[in-house]
Image: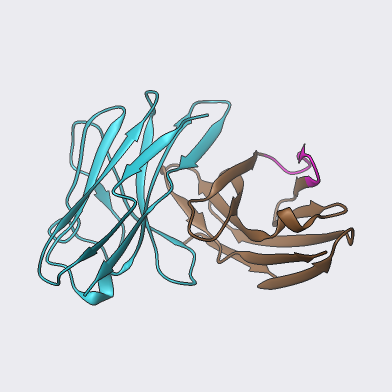
């Protein structure tokens, strides 16, 4: 298994500002993803964080709003830019291993963001 | 586009009353089906990965099964500490993407 640490665990931010969320994994992983979970809803994939190259974004999410970095195999950041109240959500980092036999994906505890 | 549908949305059980949660899926090339447990205010906790029809996995009071169209999470003699939202997700072939269902919120009453 992989242990994933996210920080901050929660934050309250002013609209128009940006917040960077960090995700640290205790071992090298092949996959890292960022999800959003809005209140009472399931998880929506924002993007796949690719090591050493630009992230791959899902429909409805763009790099200017959610820039992502992944400088190595154990660390990634997600920035929520120019925030509005609609960005209030839980943001989750996921990491895991994939090979020919097994696929596992684990989650951090999440960052609860409130935009006021 | 991959789709995952979970039912029921909510389930209330008496302690010891066994039941099953359903996850129906439509994907192009299933590489794995995940089950997670999520407690309020926390990230999802990984339970199982299933890879092919007929496969079963067990952990304590939970058993997950898989067919070509759906997966079941069987809960045997549940306890109040099993109360949580259970999420199903599929990993489709050719692309490292996981699609989640909306979850089943389970409440086990003492």
Image quadrant where one finds the C terminus of chain B: bottom right
Up/down of A41 relative to B15, above or below: below
Nearest the eye: B27 or A73: A73
Tell me if residue A48 is in the magenta stretch: no
Give the total of numbered labels: 0
A91 horizontally vs A78: left or right: right
Give whichever of B53, B63 is nearer the camera: B63
Q: Coloring scheme of the render? A: by chain
Going 12% across and 66% down the picture, which residue do you hit? A82
Residue at image x 54%, y 34%? Answer: A103
Q: Residue furthest front?
A: B110
Residue A114 percent coordinates (x, y): 28, 68
User: Residue at 13% across / 59% down in the picture?
Assistant: A18
Q: Position of residue A31 (x, y in %)?
A: 38, 35
Chain ID for brown: B
Residue B29 in view, yes or no: no
Q: Which residues are magenta?
A: B52-62
Judge whether residue A63 can be spotted in this image.
yes
Residue B7: % across, % down: 69, 69
Quick one: A47 or A18, which is closer to the camera?
A18
- Image height check: is A95 above or below A30? below
Q: Nearer the viewer, residue A110 or A45?
A: A110
Q: Is residue B64 above or below residue A35?
A: above
Chain letter, colour cyan in render:
A
> Which residue: 55% across, 55% down?
B27
- Left or right for B87, reference A108: right
Residue B54 is a magenta residue: yes
Residue B81 lies left or right of residue A21; in this view the side is right
């Amino acid at each position: 298994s992989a242990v994933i640490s996210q920080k901050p665990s929660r934050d309250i931010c002013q609209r128009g500002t940006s917040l960077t969320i960090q995700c640290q994994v205790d071992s090298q992983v092949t996959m890292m993803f960022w999800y959003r979970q809005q209140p009472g809803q399931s998880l929506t994939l924002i993007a796949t964080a690719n090591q050493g190259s630009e992230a791959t974004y899902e429909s409805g999410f763009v790099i200017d709003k959610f820039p992502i970095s992944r400088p190595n195999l154990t660390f990634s950041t997600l920035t929520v830019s120019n925030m509005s109240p609609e960005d209030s959500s839980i943001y989750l980092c996921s990491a895991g291993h994939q090979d020919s036999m097994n696929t596992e994906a684990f989650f951090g505890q999440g960052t609860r963001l409130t935009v006021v | 586009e991959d789709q995952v549908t979970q039912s029921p949305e909510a389930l209330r059980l008496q302690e010891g009353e066994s039941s099953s949660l359903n996850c129906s899926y439509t994907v192009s090339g299933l590489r794995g089906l995940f089950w997670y447990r999520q407690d309020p205010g926390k990230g999802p906790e990984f339970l199982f990965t299933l890879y092919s029809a007929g496969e079963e996995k067990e952990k304590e009071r939970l058993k997950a099964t898989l067919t070509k169209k759906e997966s079941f999470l069987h809960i045997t003699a549940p306890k109040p500490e099993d109360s949580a939202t259970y999420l199903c997700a599929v990993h489709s072939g050719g692309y490292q993407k996981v699609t989640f269902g909306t979850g089943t919120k389970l409440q086990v009453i003492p």
